[in-house]
Amino acid sequence: MADTGSAAALMSCFGIFMGSIGMTIISLSWSNTILVLGMMNILIGLASVALWLRISKKSYVMQVPERHIATASK
């Protein structure tokens, strides 16, 4: 039995938690805050792509057939 309320709460909590970690890191006294912010964005983006590529090939991830994508966009 799926509990979507719990899943939504976990997703919201994770977003707030990661945002607070990001604000804590960026508010430290850096010599070049803009460079640190850019590096954080690049590292998070690369980590997300790497995890996406690794997880998307797992057996428990359901692939959506192309025909469903084409009919949904009409």
Image: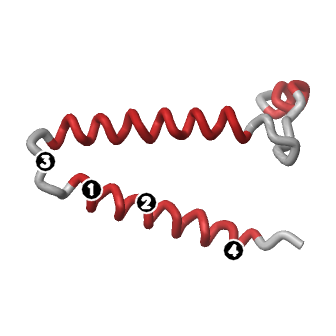
Judge from the rendering whether residue 41 lies leftward or rightward of residue 65; answer left or right: left
Q: Earlier in the sequence, mark 3 or mark 4?
A: 4
For marks 2 and 1, give the CA distance: 11 Å
Q: Residue at horizontal 44%, vertical 41%?
A: 44
Of badges 2 and 1, nearer the viewer stands: 1
Give above or below for 4 relative to 28.
below
Query: In this figure, which residue is indicated by the disc labeled 1?
Result: 25
User: Real-space Cα distance between discs 1 and 3?
Assistant: 9 Å
Q: Amino acid at mark 4?
A: Ser
Q: Nearer the viewer, residue 69 or 17?
A: 17
Q: Which residue is mark 2?
A: 18
Query: Which residue in the structure is indicated by mark 4?
Result: 6
Query: How far is the residue under mark 1 from the one under mark 4?
Result: 28 Å
Q: Residues within 10 Å of mark 2 (few under 14, many from 20)?
A: few
Is the residue 53 above or below the residue 24 in the image? above
Q: Position of residue 11 (x, y in %)?
A: 59, 63
Residue neighbourhood size for the residue with mark 3, other residues' Cα within 10 Å, grouped as few (<14), some (14–19), many (≥20): few
Q: Where is mark 3, residue-wise?
A: 30
Q: Amino acid at mark 3?
A: Trp
Q: In screen coordinates, is 52 left or right of 43?
A: right
Mark 1 vs mark 4: give the one in front: 1
Could you give the CA–CA distance between mark 3 and mark 4, rounded to whole angstroms?
38 Å
